[in-house]
Amino acid sequence: MPHNTRTISDKLLLIIKGIAMGAANKVPGVSGGVVAFVAGFYEEFIYSLQKMNGKAFKLLINLRFSSFWRYINGKFLGFLILGMLISYFSVSKLLDYLIIHYELYVWSTFFGMIIGSILYILKDFNDWSVRNITVLILGILAGVSISLLNPATENDNLWFVFFCGIISVSGMTLPGLSGSFILILLGNYVLLLVDSVNALYDTISNCIQGDYSFIDNPERIRLLKVLVVFTLGSASGLVILSHALGYLLKHYKNITFALIIGFIAGSLGVVWPWKTKVFKLDVLGNTLYDTKGNPILDNYDRFFPDLSLGQTYIAILYIILGLGIVLGLEWYGKSRIKKPH
């Protein structure tokens, strides 16, 4: 029946949106919240997360699972989170490969997508009061300031990892603030989004093969503990931040949108395609490495593109592609709204 078809289509679309959010969250400088904003489900996402409260907890401990599921908008959150999980073990790995081998073009695509996101939000924003313009400028300054900070060194203290979890979901709840980039600044991006995720992937593979030797591997156990604590921190952060943002959207919607526009605009410096990595040096000028032998990132050296190079114009085409993706999402969203049910 057509209704069932639409239902299946909506579920698949939610999973795809979750995959897009998960992929965006993995890339430093890109915010999964921007995907939610442009795809038109940001407010529903925030308000659904707000349902993780005392009433939901009572329903859960009283074993009223169906009531709990309906109360928290479980179908929406469930398929969205499923998409994010799929992303972390598939699309995000592809992104890792693309960033290593086609870094300029990946950053160019995301740069175009963020420009498209700004245009998308500005189109429907019409409250240009002095107050909102001031908030927008403050958002831009905050975004730019964050992009200029120098990263710290890796820290696997579990309390700090829990704090990182809370911070990491900022990109899902506050568009323009990249959780991945914040993790780089805190020094734990590789530990939490690469090493620990790979450890879980390897552990699941070992279990499927009936190999449980990882139990005697202290490094693997350490990474799994880190991942569990990070996940708990992320879940806590989602609930805390969603309640705060839900309140702001309800009582100060235009101010909140102005701040979000500013954050997104300020984040353009983070995803500027033409940049080189600058690594930390010791007093003798030698590159510093972490315990795994990876050079420690200090920041990026941004520069204006060389217009005599062919790859510069290819990168510009990818910027246009990124812009087109966002405009295409907007067009698709409008067509679905106008389509009669």
Image: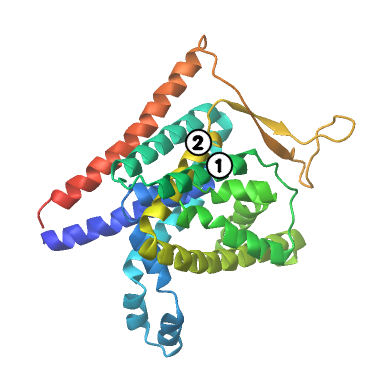
Q: Within the image, what quadrant is residue 80 found in? A: bottom left
Using a 10 Å C-alpha cutoff, classify the residue at mark 2 as few (fewer than 14 neighbours), some (14 to 19) or many (20 or more).
Answer: many
Quick check: marks 1 and 2 in contact, CB under 8 Å? no
Q: Is residue 108 left or right of residue 4?
A: right
Q: Mark 1 — residue? A: 141
Nearest to the observer: residue 280 or residue 89: 280
Query: Who's the residue at 41% across and 46% down the image?
Result: 130
Residue 30 in sight here: no
Name the residue type under label 2. Answer: Leu
Nearest to the observer: residue 281 or residue 127: 127
Residue 133 in the image, given as x and y percentages of width and height: 43, 44
| In the image, residue 134 above or below residue 304 | below
Query: Who's the residue at 59% across and 46% down the image?
Result: 181
Mark 1 residue element: helix
Q: Is residue 151 left or right of residue 271?
A: right
Nearest to the observer: residue 68 or residue 305: 305
Residue 303 in the image, given as x and y percentages of width and height: 60, 22
Q: Mark 2 — residue? A: 268
| In the image, residue 227 above or below residue 125 | below
Mark 2 residue element: helix
Name the residue type under label 1. Answer: Leu
Mark 1 → mark 2, Cα distance in angstroms = 12 Å
Count of all numbered marks drawn on residues in the image: 2
